[in-house]
Structures are given as structure tokens and as C-alpha cells.
Amino acid sequence: MKPECRLDLSDKQRNILRKRREALMQSIGNGIALVVSAKANSGPAGYRAAFRQDSDFMYLTGCPETDSLAVFIPQHPQHKSILFIRESDPLTELWNGPMLGVSAAQEQLGFDIVLPLSEIEKKIPEWLTHADSIYWDAAPELEFYDVLRPILQGSRLRRNGAEILNVRDVIHELRLFKDELEIESLQRANDIASRAHELAMRATRPGLSEFQIQALLEMSMRYAGSSQLGYPSIVAAGANACCLHYNINNSRLAEGDLLLIDAGCESNFYTADITRTWPVNGKFSDEQKAIYELVLESQLKSIDAIRPGVKLTELNDLAGKVLAEGLIHLGIIKTSLEETLEKKTHKEFFPHGLGHWLGLDVHDVGRYRIKNIERLLEPGMCMTVEPGIYIQPGMANVDARWHGIGIRIEDNILVTAQGSRNLTTCVKSTNDLEALVGTLSTAPLRDALGFDLV
């Protein structure tokens, strides 16, 4: 029997996809919107690289295939949502696996009509005739650019300059507010990633390499049901943690080091983004503990302040003030709080922002300002909260006992009508971390592999 490509979407999933399409069409009025899939890329030696669907396309269609085009026409009397997709091809399926095909897509995805790609150049000019505006992403590297550009430009000239607008601006505003299905997926991704971080803590001991801990972490995410990572894992021991996006992951874990891991996985394309920092030997030094508890205090106070109506700059200022006060108290910063905040001295130790939007992409879409006015938090927004302190090796005017300490703590927070909900369930108190680190025996894995892990 020929293998089938089945998406197994529930009625709930199809209903939410329909609502998203309706929301897009309400936003474009008497326009027409064209949304393209991601391109398939070739890997080494001609192998097909792993494919991940374009997030905007996935958000509206639920279709995981390349070479696809979705069209939305609010004013069409019969076909308001149309999907163009590849027809099933035995040779392509022989090499790359089952394809969805036109009939299966029509059955499973809930579009008004599904057509083969060969119909694009015939149908789209017809539909453009009465559109006041055309929404699409005109980036030349995107799928179907060479086909669509002359069609759209020709229609624009014939209609005396129909306005062409960026469809992503509309979609990104919709994506900023998470629906029920998105929240469920974000929670599931966080549950899996939280347990994976805790497994990494339990497996940590001096002598292992960063990439060995990375392997256990990522294996556990996949084994728990996540099909892919949300982004490349950062596994940074010792002073490597002072490099914000370190991902070489090939150093040894040494006695007295801290280990910072920033890693997340996807569930239904939605990613967690979690960071934890813990002592390799299971015991914080006095200096490490002081910095850790300061970062944790900053994070907890920031999370507690999240609610509708708050500005992100207010949260950033709060987190920065807590860190500045603590660094002054520890003698690391030697100026007054007023001078420190005015000169932003604390940003030498906390050089990034407090967080970012989270969703289908790890740095998710959605404007932070509207017409140059900072937007307020609203229910349904999801964001990270990730304060950190990084004291570079050899940092001038800082006592050497603090050098090389890099700590970040990151949770994923959903804004609710009542305040906020923390989706991240991974332990983070110093007592819980010290109790967990090094408690997992790697002997069974060593015996199964037939060689020692260090």
C-alpha cells in the first residue's frame, strides 16, 4: 500500500485555523492576500536539508509542505480561501517521502478550494481584477517570486496603481496574540524543555564536555515528543557563559564552574526558550550564589510586575534597577544608584534587554511600538523574562573573585487578564539546583555504549 501523508488535524485545530484566516481577511478589507511557503533547501552532497515551514504560512494554513501558496479573497462569492499545492508525484515521493497532494489537502486543511500549482498563472490574474489592494511579501528570495511579481505588477498597472502592501505586517499583528491552541502548544513545549533542563542538571558533573550534556538534553526533548529544537542550544561552562550566544559547546566542565544552558524545543511549531545556570559540582561558591540570587530576585520582581497595561520599558527599568542595586551592594559597581542608572553603568554587566516575544519563532514577531508609541502589554501576549549578569574575565575595576561569572535565568510568561502565567516549570532556586545536580548515574549509558563518558 502506498504511504499516505496525513496531518491528523483535530476539529479544534481546523476551527482555529479557519478563525485565523477570517481574522486576516477582516484586516485586508477589499484586498487580496498571498502567503507563500518556505523553500526547500539542499543539504550537503545533494541531500535534502531538514525543512521547516515558514511560520506565517504555517499559522494560517497548517500545511507543512514546500512549494505551496495560500490566497485569501474576502470579497469572492465562492472561494475566499484558496491553497495551491503540488500534485502527488511518484518520483518525488520515492526520494523524499509522501506528499499531501491536492485531494488530501482539500479534505484535511479546510480551505474553500485547493488547486494544483499549474493553475496559479490562470487564476490569480482573474482574482486581482476587483482587489483594491494586494498584500504579499515581495522579497526576491521567496517562493514564487518570479511567477507572482509580473502578475502583480501587470495587474497594478492595468488598475492604475492598486496599492501593494506587506502581508507580513498584518499576520504578525495577529500572531502577537496567542489563541487557545497556541497556548497549549507553548505550555507543552515548556513542559518538555523544563524536564530536559532538569535531566541535564542531574547528569552534570566535572569532567564531562558541554556537548555531552547537550546530547542528553536534546535527546530527552526529542524522546519526550518534540520533533525539533527551537534554536541552537547554548551550553556554556565557566567563562563561556559570558558570551551571550556561545554555541561552540566543546569545553570540559571543570570543578568550580557554573554551567549555563539556554535551550528550548518545539511543540506543534511553538517553541520554549528557557535558560538555567547551575554549579557543575553541585555547590555554588559564595560569589556565584550572591550573583545568582541577585539575578533571580530581578527576574521574580519583573515577572510579578507583568500585567495588562504595563510597558516593556517599565519592566526593563525595574529589572535593571534591581541588578544595579545589588551590584552596588556587592561592591562590584562603586557609584551611587542615581549615577549608575544615569550613566547606565549596570549595562556593562547586563548588556541585553529583559526579554522578547515568543511563539512560532523564538524571537517572535509583533511590533513593540505602534506609530512610534510604545505599546502596552495585553492578554494573550507571550514573552520571555531573562535578566542576567556577565562579569568578563579580566574586567577592569572588578575584583578578580567575580571574574568569569555568567548567569542568566529565563522563563516564558503569558500575559493574562488577571496578570500573568509562568509557563516554565523548571526548578531555579539555589537549594533546588544544588539538590538536583549530579544525582543521575550515567553508568547505564556508559555500559550500553561500551566506553566511558569522560
Image (cartoon, rainbow, N blue to C red):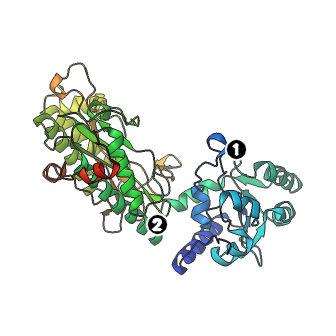
Question: Which amino acid does the dot numbered 2 rest on?
Answer: Glu
Task: Compare residues 28 and 350 and report the one nearer the observer.
Answer: 350
Q: Is residue 279 left or right of residue 245?
A: left
| Image: 337 above or below 17 | above
Q: Can you give x and y, in whole percent of width and height, for residue 140 in the image? A: 72, 43
Q: Is residue 144 left or right of residue 240?
A: right
Q: Nearer the viewer, residue 446 or 385?
A: 446
Given the current orientation, which residue lies at the most extreme right position?
158
**Which disc, if any, is residue 377?**
none
Residue plotted at (56% across, 77% down): 15
| Residue 77 at x, y percent in the picture | 77, 78
Q: Which residue is mark 1?
A: 141
Is residue 34 visible in the rendered image? The answer is: no
Count of numbered marks: 2
Q: If you read the primary sequence from the N terminus, does the residue marked by circle 1 or circle 2 appear first?
A: 1
Which of the pair 422/5 is nearer the observer?
5
Q: Residues within 10 Å of mark 2 (few under 14, many from 20)?
A: many
**Disc 1 on helix, strand or loop?**
loop
Looking at the rendered image, the quarter that the N terminus falls into is: bottom right
Residue 281 lies, with reference to residue 431, above or below; the image says above
The amino acid type, in three-letter code, at marker 1 is Glu
Q: Is residue 296 visible?
A: yes
Q: For the residue labelled by badge 2, is the local secondary structure a helix, a strand or a loop?
A: helix
Location of residue 287 (image quadrant): top left
- Name the residue rendered at 39%, 54% in the picture: 219
Q: Does residue 107 sit above or below 253 in this rendering?
A: below
In this figure, which residue is indicated by the disc labeled 2?
182
